[in-house]
Image: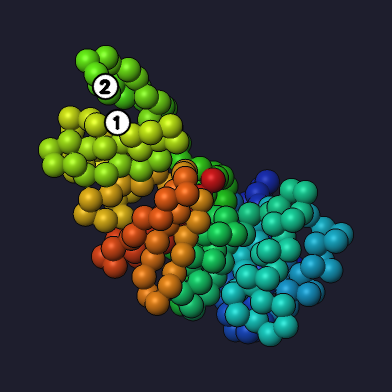
């Protein structure tokens, strides 16, 4: 384990874990140059990192995925059981683990070779608590049923299905038709965490319970309902999930 200090005053103390020395040195150097980072600790194995974390607290962990012995994913599973789990940023050459990173609620998922500006974005997400949820004020959505208008909380809507010129809003209690096309809702509700996963489906990131990858096809589970993600929308969804999971 070694330590280097960045140029900030009061900043982050981060731990970098990678079994490849050149990658470890490069990442720790880049992080030490970030003014928001006060100190950088390094380890070349997950088991060494666990020993270190018994005595020290860090503000974030930058973690390789594939390492001999205890892998990065397995280490993240252990960290998730900590009373106060440190934010984890995966730094890896293997993009196929993005769904696993989502399941482990990683703050970010950075691909090697690491660019300084991309790493700076990951640090920003750590500092600002990104990946802890989608922000935005709730909205009251008027829907009609049997001539009676009622209002739904947008936060209660789990997914939206295209229904001609209408959209069918699904909640845990049932569904309602809204006289607004899906394309318009995608534009209006995107900042609130609704994302297109299929030409006929919008899903609320906050209500995704599970992501499944089978034979190259992606599905998400929302309130017990399996929804198919089109191949076109799969990469974008994976990226959003790693950043925005509650």
Vertically, is 244 above or below 122? above
Tell me the tag on residue 46: none
Q: Quadrant of residue 197?
A: bottom left
Q: Is residue 139 left or right of residue 82?
A: left
Secondary structure under tag 1 reads strand
The residue at 40%/55% (across/down) is 226
Disc 2 to disc 1, how far (Cα)?
A: 8 Å
What residue is pinned by disc 1? 176
Vertically, is 174 above or below 59? above
Q: Quadrant of residue 220?
A: bottom left
Closest to the observer, 118 or 238: 238
**Crowding at mark 2 (Cα within 10 Å: few <14, some 14-19, many 20+):** few
Q: Is residue 187 visible?
A: no
In percent of width and height, residue 101 lies at: 54, 63
The residue at 43%/73% (across/down) is 214
Tell me the tag on residue 145: 2
Vertically, is 16 above or below 220? below
Vertically, is 8 above or below 65? above
Mark 2 and mark 1 lie on one chain; the one further toward the N terminus is: 2
The residue at 77%/49% (across/down) is 83
Seen from this angle, which residue lies furthest top?
148
Question: Are discs 2 and 1 less than 8 Å apart at CB?
Answer: yes
Seen from this angle, which residue lies furthest front?
146
In percent of width and height, residue 118 lies at: 44, 63
Q: Is residue 13 left or right of residue 229?
A: right
**Crowding at mark 1 (Cα within 10 Å: few <14, some 14-19, many 20+):** some
The residue at 30%/47% (across/down) is 202
Closest to the observer, 20 or 166: 166
Secondary structure under tag 2 reads strand
């Amino acid at each position: 384990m070694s330590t280097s200090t960045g140029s900030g005053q009061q900043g982050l103390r981060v731990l970098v874990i990678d079994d490849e020395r050149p990658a470890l040195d490069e990442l720790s150097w880049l992080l030490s140059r970030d003014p928001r980072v006060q100190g950088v600790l390094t380890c070349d194995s997950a088991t060494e990192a666990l020993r270190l974390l018994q005595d020290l607290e860090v503000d974030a962990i930058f973690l390789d995925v594939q390492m001999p012995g205890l892998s990065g994913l397995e280490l993240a599973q252990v960290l998730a059981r900590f009373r106060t789990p440190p934010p984890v940023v995966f730094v890896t050459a293997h993009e196929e683990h993005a769904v696993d990173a989502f399941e482990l609620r990683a703050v970010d998922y950075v691909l090697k070779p690491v660019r300084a500006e991309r790493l700076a974005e990951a640090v920003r997400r750590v500092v600002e608590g990104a990946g802890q949820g989608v922000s935005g004020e709730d909205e009251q959505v008027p829907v009609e049923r049997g001539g009676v208008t009622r209002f739904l909380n947008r936060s209660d809507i789990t997914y939206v299905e295209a229904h001609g010129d209408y959209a069918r809003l699904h909640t845990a209690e049932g569904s309602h038709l809204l006289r607004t096309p899906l394309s318009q809702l995608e534009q209006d509700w995107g900042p609130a965490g609704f994302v297109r996963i299929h030409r006929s489906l919008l899903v609320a990131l906050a209500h995704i319970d599970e992501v499944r990858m089978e034979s190259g096809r992606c599905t998400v589970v929302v309130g017990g309902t399996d929804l198919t993600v089109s191949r076109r929308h799969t990469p974008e969804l994976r990226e959003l999930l790693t950043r925005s999971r509650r």
